[in-house]
Image: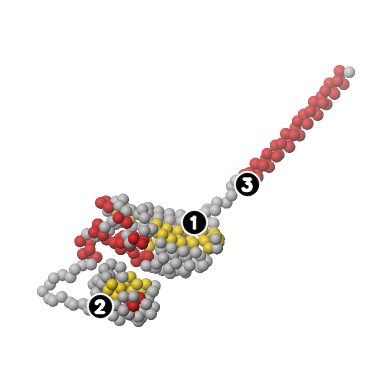
Amino acid sequence: MRVAIIVILLFFCKAAELRKASPRSGRSRAPHGRAAGGRSGSNPVKRYAPGLPCEVYTYLHEKYLDCQERKLVYVLPGWPQDLLHMLLARNKIRILKNSMFSKFKKLKSLDLQQNEISKIENEAFFGLNKLTTLLLQHNQIKVLTEEVFLYTPLLSYLRLYDNPWSCTCQMETLVSMLQIPRNRNLGNYAKCESPPELKNKKLRQIKSEQLCSEEEKERVDPKPQVSGRPPVIKPEADSTLCYNYVFPIQTLDCKRKELKKVPNNIPPDIVKLDLSYNKIKLLRPKEFEDVHELKKLNLSSNGLEFIDPGPLR
């Protein structure tokens, strides 16, 4: 009898253990499944991870290229030419070369912040005549001239801060451009890194004489030396005094030639004409009527007093 009771008790104990084991196994499987699902959902692919292809998308009917944090050093050839906005922040770009963006003629904004840019060639933004926003902050740019921005006539928002600006005579044209009242949104907060006496001075607040000493001006534009022979009299306005360049576009460089008026005999196929840093006080009617291909004209630092509207028609 005792044996029978013991056998029955053992049977019920075994059954109880089986019932307890079954719910535990079910519960252990359920959390495992939820945890697995949670891990897969909480680790999405990073949108800006290096090595991924650039993303092209449309937002509010405008086409964007998002190529941030891709370790790029240059513009890739396969990008669409009808882009309106280009995001290239946080890459490895060091030099902006001539005509680097020229095929993106519709571009309205260009974000190049937080790269390693130390040099911008004068024709780097050639073709971007619709660009309104340019971000160049957080780079390594030391010197820049106004000439770089001749190809962006609609530029109204420019960021240049957190660059190690070397405030010397080479920066005079850029500083003058930033201080024009209509350019109030260009170059705000940008400060000099050197020389020591101008460190932390804002570019928009520096005076021209602080940038260029007399010695520096003499090196940039040396005065003729006095000698026993009579000085050579240069023609007042002859285009043969200027330099003619064919590449990348037809250019006539008449900078710092002491011209008192627009030179004669300008080649009719000239696309860019630089007359900056001369002594031209007025523009007479029909000055450029024979220069049919002219698209870029630089007359800065001349002290112009009168412009007849005829020359620019």
Location of the C terminus (image quadrant): bottom left
The residues bearing labels 2 and 3 have C-alpha atoms spaced at a distance of 75 Å
The residues bearing labels 2 and 1 have C-alpha atoms spaced at a distance of 50 Å
Q: Is residue 247 visible?
A: no
Q: Earlier in the sequence, mark 1 or mark 3?
A: 3
> In this view of the protein, which residue sits in the foreground, 65 or 27?
65
What mark, if any, has residue 40 been given in the picture?
3
Secondary element type, mark 2: loop
Q: Amino acid at mark 2?
A: Ala
Mark 2 vs 1: CB contact within 8 A:
no
> In this view of the protein, which residue sits in the foreground, 275 or 205?
205
Residue 168 lies, in percent from the top left, at: 27, 58
Identified at 54% across, 56% down, the residue is 52
What mark, if any, has residue 237 been given in the picture?
2
Identified at 47% across, 58% down, the residue is 88
Q: Nearer the viewer, mark 2 or mark 1?
A: 2
* Residue indicated by mark 1: 68
The residues bearing labels 1 and 3 have C-alpha atoms spaced at a distance of 25 Å
Q: Amino acid at mark 3?
A: Ser
Residue 148: quadrant of the picture? bottom left
Say whether residue 198 is left or right of residue 58: left
